[in-house]
Image: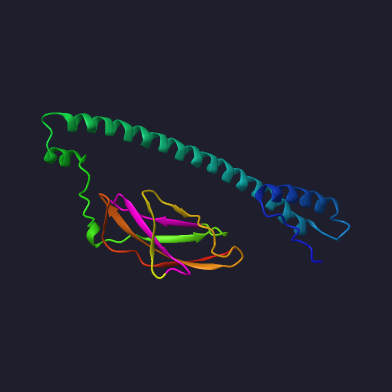
Amino acid sequence: MPKSDFIPRTDSDFLVWHDQFKTSVLAQAATFGLVAADTTPITNDNTDIHAKVTSVNSTSAIATQAVADKNTSRANANKHARALAARIKAHPAYTVALGSLLGIEGPQDTTDLTTSKPTLAGVDQTGGVVELDFDKSISDGVNIYAKRDGDADFVFLARDTASPYIDNRPLLVATKPELREYKAVYVQSDAEIGLFSDEMVVNCAP
């Protein structure tokens, strides 16, 4: 049976190993006919790698704290800006033009649901369970249709307003894989709108 690589992968384990290697090489130098030219690079490497790992760990800790501090600052800035923007928008003197000047009018959403279609993806969870992920854009949700062995055409499966949808129908034959086809369409004000998604096939394993 082949042996694993003697050099550890992680920095912490490598430092422990290299310390022992350096100490043992120096102690056994005469045994193996080693001279200073052989052992000095090992000693220098040991000093250097300790310094570099210490620097990385220190820098990493500083970076982690810096990111946390930035996230806190961003959250505070968001909260205060939104609160003040809400007060300004509620003032009688407020106009859309002034809001645009202040940068507190969001861009106009130009999505046209009548020409849009959902994106649908599915993952087999085995045993007949399929997880369906979809985007609902600016719609109220999607109607999901499915087709499998025995279905003449796609049949309505469910309406969902939040991804993912879980199709947990049991397999037609518990021990036999089956193919399921899916498609979806946007729903707005209880009516279907736009185009059907591309049809997607999921191979359901027992």
Q: Image height check: is 200 above or below 89?
A: below
Residue 190 % position (x, y) = 27, 50
Residue 183 % position (x, y) = 38, 63
**Total numbered labels placed on residues in the image:** 0
Quarter where residue 70 is shown: top left
User: Which residue is painted at 54% across and 43% down in the image?
Assistant: 60
Q: Magenta includes 89?
A: no
User: Which residue is painted at 28% across and 63% down in the image?
Assistant: 195
Closest to the observer, 135 or 78: 135
Residue 137 left/right relative to 68:
left
Q: Magenta includes 133?
A: yes
Residue 202 left/right relative to 16:
left
Extreme right residue here? 31
User: Which residue is painted at 76% across and 55% down in the image?
Assistant: 39
Residue 118 % position (x, y) = 33, 59
Residue 134 % position (x, y) = 39, 56
Closest to the observer, 44 or 168: 168
The stretch of residues the image draws in magenta is 130-151
Quarter where residue 75 is shown: top left
